[in-house]
Amino acid sequence: MTSNRRLVVANLDLDADVFAAIHAALTAGNLLPGTAVLLEDFAELGPTLAQDGIELFALYSRRADSSLPSLSRALARIGAVDLTLEQMQARHAVRKITLVDCGELPCAPLSDFNAVAQYLEAFAENLETDAAGGVMALDFDLSGEPAQLKLLDTQSPDFVDHFVAYTKQTLRMLNSGFGQGDLPGG
């Protein structure tokens, strides 16, 4: 992200209290890629703030399926985000959409790929053709003090290693007496 691009954080479908806790932990842990403002606050500040470009950082709840009922809340919110940017006359300023796939530990590291693709397509329908897209995965546990957060870029080797380790562990559990036996080595 360039230093003059404004990072705008939006909640697609996380419960309000979960979103607030994650946003606070991301901010406190300096995990956001730059100084961020919530979409609601950005809309109140006016369209002149968009002149240097916007990176939209959209958080949503991890999904195990891509059926429309499962996705409908986030898709409706994507439409609302687009309308907000249109009303601000700032939609043209969006240079990047970063979807942040948020899941409680120990769930799968990423939503069903079709769900992620539908979110990206919904955003892309109303963006300039030169806007970029990206996906990050956020694993969290809000039960402790402080909250545990692990933010991974899905293009990074760390994410690939995380995804592979989760898959191997899950397959071991499935093949060891329905999760009741010891995990085999290797």
Image (cartoon, helix red, strand yellow):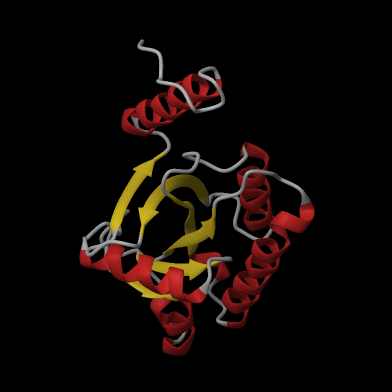
In the rendered image, the vertical position of residue 101 relative to residue 3, given as above or below: above
Q: Quadrant of residue 64?
A: top right
In the rendered image, the vertical position of residue 36 relative to residue 164, given as above or below: below
**Percent from the top left, x then y, of residue 68?**
78, 53
**Percent from the top left, x then y, of residue 107?**
48, 43
How many marks can you see?
0
Residue drawn at (35%, 12%) of the image: 185
Residue drawn at (43%, 46%) of the image: 136
Viewer-nearest residue: 128 or 12: 12
Viewer-nearest residue: 79 or 110: 110
Taking the image as shown, residue 45 lies to the left or right of residue 69, namely left
Q: Quadrant of residue 165?
A: top left
Viewer-nearest residue: 56 or 59: 59
Taking the image as shown, residue 127 lies to the left or right of residue 109, namely right
Residue drawn at (41%, 76%) of the image: 38
Viewer-nearest residue: 78 or 181: 181
**Percent from the top left, x then y, of residue 153?**
38, 41
Q: Quadrant of residue 25?
A: bottom left
In the rendered image, the vertical position of residue 10 relative to residue 129, given as above or below: below
Taking the image as shown, residue 153 lies to the left or right of residue 60, namely left
Give the position of the C terminus as an image quadrant. top left
Q: Residue furthest top?
A: 186
Residue drawn at (44%, 69%) of the image: 19
